[in-house]
Amino acid sequence: MKKWFNVALLVLAAAVLAACSTVDKSGSDSQVAGAGANTVLGKLPAAYRGELPCADCEGIRYHLALFDDKRYTLEMVYLGAGEQARLHKQGQWSLNDKTSTLTLEGIDDSPNKWRVISADTIEQLDMQGQPINSQMNYTLQRIEPFLSEPLENSYWKLIQLGGERVDVQVSQSEAHIVLHSEDNRVSGAAGCNRLMGGFKTSENQLELGPLATTMMACDSASMALEQRFLAALNEVASYRVLVSQLELYNANDELLARFERVDLT
């Protein structure tokens, strides 16, 4: 009898330990990046937009896109004076489902935390992650349907190449590409010369070329950019459109170049 009692006691102890382990694990999971995000934020991808206060301008228009692989893109337009001041951010997002706090990684010069009020509304928090005590609006509203710019028939301006930001100098032409859907033709500029060629696409796969360029001579900086840009385009195997940005990847899923859509109208 004593033997059976000891066995029963051991089984009971094991069950208690297993239960404690399960509770601890679930509590830890609530802090993991993105845990429970689909429940709090609703269906992803999702886009939020709104105008928030600005200390030295008429306001800041925010356009935030959240993707289901925990990536985000953020565009901030400073209103007034032609609305030419634009900032673009991208990175990883995480969500603490206990506090419903959304964090945008990689933003250090402005508030990067938001309180998820509902799947339709998020509210900006201050630099310390605390609510902003103000009567002014600090919320963004979800916009439906979620739309990304089309790959084809858009002017894509090169903004990043091989992990380095591309800034156009006075002596350079703006490096860009346009994929024309009507005849599967690509055109654009490589930094000095105009480029042209064909393209093939299927789902998220993309092949550019063969590519040709005009034969002008430019300064050394423009020619160096052009050579790197053309080399990257020849490696393209896939693409991804993140709202108003285009990313090109090679066969190893390594980021080759990033572009920003420019509205020419």
Image (spheres, grey):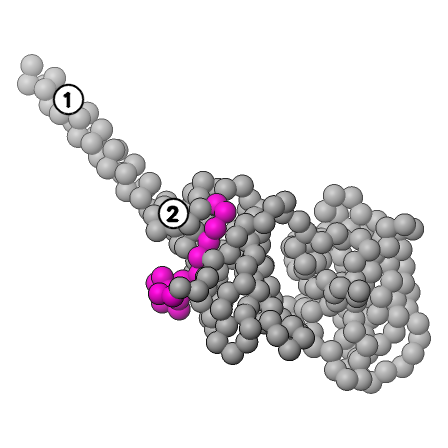
Q: Quadrant of residue 233?
A: bottom right
User: Is-magenta flag for residue 199?
Assistant: no
**Residue 221 appears left or right of 197:** left
Name the quadrant of the N terminus: top left
Range covered by the magenta-colored residues = 119-134
Amino acid at the residue labelled 1: Val
Q: How many marks?
A: 2
Numbered circle sitting on residue 97? 2
Task: Residue 73 in the image: state x and y as whole percent.
Answer: 58, 59
**Residue 226 appears left or right of 95:** right
Q: Is residue 7 visible?
A: yes
Residue at figure coordinates x 78%, y 44% from the top left:
202
Residue at figure coordinates x 79%, y 71% from the top left:
175
Residue beneath label 1, please?
A: 7
Of the pair 31 and 113, the residue shown nearer to us: 113
Q: Is residue 96 above or below residue 127?
A: above
Counting residues from the start of the chain, the first of labels 1 and 2 encountered is 1
Amino acid at the residue labelled 2: Asp
- Element assignment for label 2: loop
Alpha-carbon span between mark 1 and mark 2: 40 Å
**Residue 186 appears left or right of 252:** right
